[in-house]
Image (tube, rainbow, N blue to C red):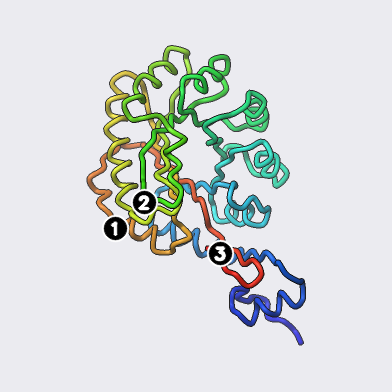
Amino acid sequence: MRRPRFIDPFQPTEVRRLVTEFGSPLLILDCERVRVQFRKLRKALPRVDLHYALKPMPHPAVVQTVIEEGGFLDLATTGEMQLVQRLGVAPDRCIHTHPIKREQDIANALQFGVRLFVADNPDEVRKFARLTAAAQLLLRVSFRAPGAVCDLSRKFGCDPEELLPLARLAADLGIGVRGLSFHVGSQTADAGKHVEALAACARLMAAARREIALARLEYQLAAPHDPSGAERLQHGKLSVVEFREGDVLCITIKLLVFVELGHKQIH
């Protein structure tokens, strides 16, 4: 029997058929679902550069799908950089967001052509002191979200009151600071946490502009596995957050794919 060109691999009958054919445990990637999720987020957040973080699913098919949809990439390791290089992705579509990097990781990324990195502490900033002509920074700020399943601000990001001293250090070393970065936590159900952090970053950027030229805000939206997450953010009180003409909001998509392992669905 001839199979249809497109199937929904998450229908129970298809799952049973695929497990029968390929065995279990079985990992199923549905790139059509990746496209649907990406387009929903792009519609909810127009004029936004959407960056897919490879860390949850660094599969070539997923990465290629994001690129085909006009997306950008968030890299955190040399392995991820090597993967996108093999796929022929242009380096100017990538940023490196791991807050703690080995010098070799920085060198590898620069050799590939990545120019924008994230830092959240003085020691990390100083790693770029001799690379001022090749690299620029986003400074990561910590905003706690106790309701998140994984509150990453417990371990990454500087406190808001530490942002200006960190920006001054970068300026004193001649390192270009493009703007700010934050992550309010994976699976944050309250879109208001993103709005609160955006408003705080707007105030920090305004204060920093009086001393240093900042032009970018980057933050990580970790809720696309909930299809309504982007819509809730879109209809939140974003109107109270004001940025200058030319500011760029760069969102890192943490999860776009639904994974089926055996008969247990993981969102």
Mark 3 belongs to which amino acid?
Ile
Residue 61: x and y in percent read 67, 57
Q: Is residue 59 above or below residue 96?
A: below
Q: Is residue 71 above or below residue 23?
A: above
Q: Is residue 205 above or below residue 43?
A: above
Q: Which mark is residue 134?
A: none
The residue positioned 46% from the left and 35% from the top of the image is 156
Residue receiving disc 3? 266
Q: CA distance from mark 3 to mark 1?
A: 27 Å
Question: Looking at the rendering, in which quadrant would you find the N terminus?
Answer: bottom right
Q: Residue furthest bottom?
A: 1
Q: Are marks 3 and 1 in contact (CB under 8 Å)?
A: no
Quarter occupied by residue 90: top right
Nearer mark to the viewer, of 3 and 1: 3
Nearer mark to the viewer, of 2 and 3: 2
The residue positioned 33% from the left and 54% from the top of the image is 190
Q: Residue furthest top?
A: 172
Residue 246: x and y in percent read 36, 36
Residue receiving disc 1? 235
Q: Is residue 9 left or right of residue 161?
A: right
Give the mark nearer the N terminus: 2 vs 1.
2
Categorize mark 3 by other alpha carbons within 10 Å: few (<14), some (14-19), many (20+). few
Q: Nearer the viewer, residue 148 or 231?
A: 148
Residue receiving disc 2? 147
Residue 248: x and y in percent read 40, 39
Quarter occupied by residue 133: top right
Mark 1 belongs to which amino acid?
His
Q: Secondary structure at mark 3?
A: strand
